[in-house]
Amino acid sequence: MRPEFLGNHYILELFDCDADMLNDIPQLQETMLKAAAIAKATVINKSFHKFSPHGISGTIVIAESHFNVHIWPEYGFAAVDLFTCGDTLQPEAAKNYLIKAMGAKDFEYAKMRRGDVKKNENI
Amino acid sequence: MRPEFLGNHYILELFDCDADMLNDIPQLQETMLKAAAIAKATVINKSFHKFSPHGISGTIVIAESHFNVHIWPEYGFAAVDLFTCGDTLQPEAAKNYLIKAMGAKDFEYAKMRRGDVKKNENI
């Protein structure tokens, strides 16, 4: 049976996060990997980079798509994307964990459904 | 001066793409790297994986955030994310290139502004 959608994509905007989390790659990486574990994702690869004078970007490639984080420490801000496919993962649990773990004093999120393949009659 | 937004995020849903592009990692990778060049992004790292029995995930880490692609060849579908920060990049040109290069017979896209840091008065 063709699924209704192929993927779930949580878009998280985390404001006024803990300063430690915004400048420390090992701590941020551990937090993102724990989020992947909470989501029950299978980690394939990861890539975290610190930029000059500040800022961190991190990607975790999972068998079920990806988790991304981009940090602007000068604004206390983290942009997070949790893209998962399949029915067995728990991205919402990962979202809830990350909001707390990043110490976000304010946040917004949107849940997008990706791959509405039923709408396209050609496929 | 604090920018109005920190990042631009194009979310692309590409339907009924060229079969070649959906199964060939080197071709897909070359296409995504060309999109990054068209956007005037600085590539830092890339990671492309083919899954069994089918499917490809690709991440290009750029100095200005990331490009992602996830492929479901069985549905002819590609989910693409182009996340850029700063004022000098041209993600819209990359978006237009990718729609053509992937041979998408139908597509949808949304442009999201990420990091509306002005709204948060604490920072």
Image (cartoon, coloured by chain):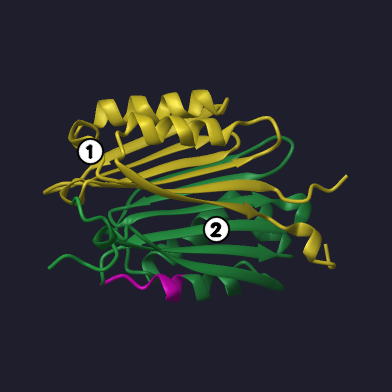
Chain colours: A green, B yellow
Which chain contains the residue that carries disc 2? A
Residue B88 image-quadrant placement:
top right
Which chain contains the residue that carries disc 1? B
Residue A53 image-quadrant placement:
top right
- Label ID, residue B22: 1
| Circle count | 2
Disc 2 designates what residue? A80
Q: Nearer the viewer, mark 1 or mark 2?
A: 1
Residue A92 image-quadrant placement:
bottom left
- Find residue B64 and report its horizontal and vertical position in percent: 60, 37
Marks 1/2: CA–CA distance: 27 Å
Density class for disc 2 (Cα within 10 Å; few <14, some 14-19, many ≥20) is: many
- Find residue A93 and report its horizontal and vertical position in percent: 44, 76
Residue in the picture at 24% in, 33% down: B21
Q: Secondary structure at mark 1?
A: helix
Badge 2 amino acid:
Val
